[in-house]
Every structure is written in C-alpha cells, then in structure tokens.
Amino acid sequence: MNEAEVEVIVVITIDTNQVNMVRRHAIDIKDRDEGARADKMISDHNVGFQMLKKLGWEGAGTGLGSSTTGITEPIKGGEIRLGEQKYLGVGHSQGDEDDIFDQYRKAKSYTYQRSDVNSKDKKPAGCFRCGK
C-alpha cells in the first residue's frame, strides 16, 4: 500500500463535564490573577461595596470595624485546588500533610489509646472517695 492511499480516521470523544470543568478552572485562574489587589479598588456599584457601606464602612482607605482600626486591604485568596483538596480552607497549606503511612499509624495509635480507656475488661480502680 502506498502512503498516499492510507486514510486516517480520528474519532474524538469529549466529555462535557470535563470541558465545563476546564472552562471553570480557566475562569478561576483568570479571576485569581486579576484578584483582590489594593491598587484596584472596587466600584461603588459592587454588591459587596454597597453591603459594607450599609454596615457603616466609610470607604476606601479606612479600616473595618466599629473603631475603623481593622484591615484596610482585601485578603488574598488561596491557591486553586482540584479534586478532594478543593474543600480545604484558604489557610491550609499542602505541605502540612504527612505521607499515607504516617496517617495510618497515627489513626491506629489513636484507636488503640481510646480502646484502653474504654475497655470493659478492666477492674474498677476502687472507691472514688477513699481510693481503696
């Protein structure tokens, strides 16, 4: 067979859930890059701005709280996570986790300690009043 006579058929299947996830992820990254910065103030048409004004906030440059001594700049967002880790909090760093063996060992150690405390085979220590 000659190479010119070979016909190549490519079938591409696209999972719409995966495509939507990729689109959302791309949007999140874009928003994060633009994110909360002190040099880019929100407009007075922003819903959050209006809510803060109704609660007594005086505007840009003043701190939050009743004595206006709170934070003046927006908080920074955390990194973008996928899968199980997307439910972790903003302050959680991914380097805090032990390896899987240490997690297993700690869980078993805790279970063993708790079984000693709640064991029904133990004899009572004695009278709680006199200690005999």
Image (cartoon, rainbow, N blue to C red):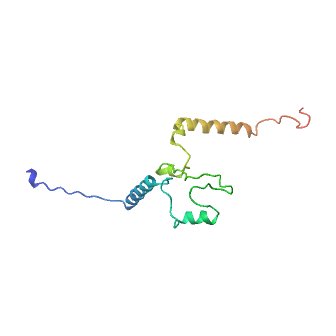
Can residue 1 be seen in this snapshot? no
| Left or right placement of residue 67 versus residue 32 in this view | right
Residue 32 seen anywhere in this rendered image of the structure: yes
Numbered label tally: 0
Question: For this view, does 21 lie left or right of residue 99?
Answer: left
| For residue 92, above or below residue 10 | above
Residue that sits furthest to the top in the current view: 132
For the residue pair 113 and 20, the one nearer the viewer reads as: 20
The x and y percentages for residue 10 are 23, 57
Quadrant holding the C terminus: top right
Indicate the quadrant where residue 115 lies: top right
| Residue furthest to the right | 130
- Choose top left, top right, bottom left or bottom right for residue 122: top right
How far across and down, in percent of the image, does residue 120 sit? 76, 40
Q: Residue at x 54, y 39 (%)?
A: 96
Is residue 69 toward the left or the right of residue 101 in the image? right
Relative vertical location of residue 51 with respect to residue 97 in this rendering, above or below:
below
Q: Residue at x 47, y 54 (%)?
A: 35
Report the side of 93 relative to 24 (left or right). Answer: right
Whole-percent x, y for residue 27 in the image = 41, 58
Give the residue drawn at x 51%, y 42%: 94
Residue sitting farthest toward the left: 2
Q: Nearer the viewer, residue 15 or 31?
A: 31
